[in-house]
Image (spheres, helix red, strand yellow):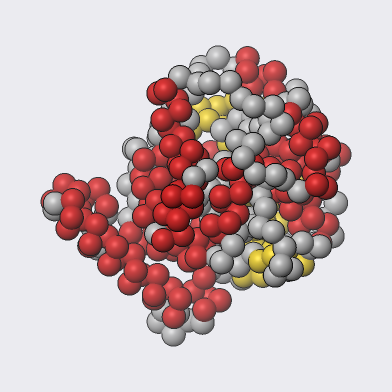
Amino acid sequence: MTPTRREFLETASAASVATAAAGAVTQSMAQLAEGTNGRSDAEAAGPNPRSVATAVLDIGYEEHGPPGGTAVILLHGFPYDIRSFDGVVAPLADAGHRVLVPYLRGYGTTRFRDPSASRMAEQAAIARDVIDFADALGIEQFATAGFDWGNRAACIASILEPARIIGQVAIGGYSVQNTVTPGNSMPARIAARFWYMWYFNTERGRAALEADRHDIIRYLWDTWSPQWTYSDEAYARSAPSFDNPDFVEVVVHSYRHRLLNAPGEERFLDVERRLAERPPVPVPAIVLHPGASGLGGTPSPDPSGDQARFTDLVARRIVDGAGHDLPAHRPDAVADALLELLG
């Protein structure tokens, strides 16, 4: 078995670790790109890869379960991809639900349809992509679960189109941002967690992401889930998603727009003004907080904040043993919450 990153760190010098880990990931990525054991590129990338066209994107996704079942859309975040939900899919599909797992813009096989379009990724755009994705598949109502960017998109979709959302599993809680008014200062210990966000707001940060995105992403994976050990094989399964040609521009725009250092799309100006007021999520929701996140810190036992932001809060749970990538660490918690909401 290939040693994990943590095992490398315990048995080798830092320089040896970097060389060995990079070599293992590069080799695994090459096997994925070329197809392993005779598999085609599509088969190596994952099961039943599909694509659907919206006005802006060709959205790559995977689908599981009966096509006539209640639709459930699972939404990944930065810097992860649809593989985070691999353990969530089977319980939902076995229960008769139609499970859809799309790549967000800038990830995997999702592509902008217009080669000349600006690669923007403000929160309103990501949420609109979810609604457009459902529209393109002819889905009127659906449930969602998401974390990080995916949770933000799900929260906003619930705010904008509440009649269409059967229920939402909000991993990490309320995630809507004020991108209109400059934010207040924050304590240094909290600001330090978001170093990557400040870094991407500089040209040096953009250049670093362009030059070696896997170095940054793998570091975030490890530090955001300090009680979880990712193997090189696990990373290699997701790594091709980050080689999407739009990845860098999408990530950079998202974080610069968030800090008011880049303009958004004109069509979303009114939406962003509405979101700046931090409206509550009105649909039935279960909030899951990771109990061991290196990004969000220790979740508060006080439920009042979530109760204020989710006006139809069904349950609030702190999930032990889960880092920021909660669906990968505790898929049972996500699947159980969705099944509870879906009855």
Viewer-closest of 95 and 70:
70
Extreme bottom residue here? 38
Tell me if I can see residue 320 in this picture: no
Q: Position of residue 149 (x, y in %)?
A: 60, 44
In the rendered image, the vertical position of residue 204 relative to residue 65, given as above or below? above
> What residue is shown at x 72% (from left), y 45% (from top)?
264
Extreme front residue here? 203
> What residue is shown at x 70% (from left), y 23% (from top)?
309
Q: Position of residue 80 (x, y in %)?
A: 50, 52
Q: Is residue 339 left or right of residue 185?
A: right
Tell me the quarter of the picture where residue 139 sits: bottom right
Tell me the quarter of the picture where residue 272 sits: top right
Q: Position of residue 219 (x, y in %)?
A: 36, 47
Q: Quadrant of the N terminus?
A: bottom left
Q: Is residue 112 left or right of residue 13?
A: right
Q: Position of residue 281 (x, y in %)?
A: 74, 30
Viewer-closest of 218 and 91:
218
Q: Quadrant of the C terminus?
A: top right
Q: Is residue 167 left or right of residue 2?
A: right
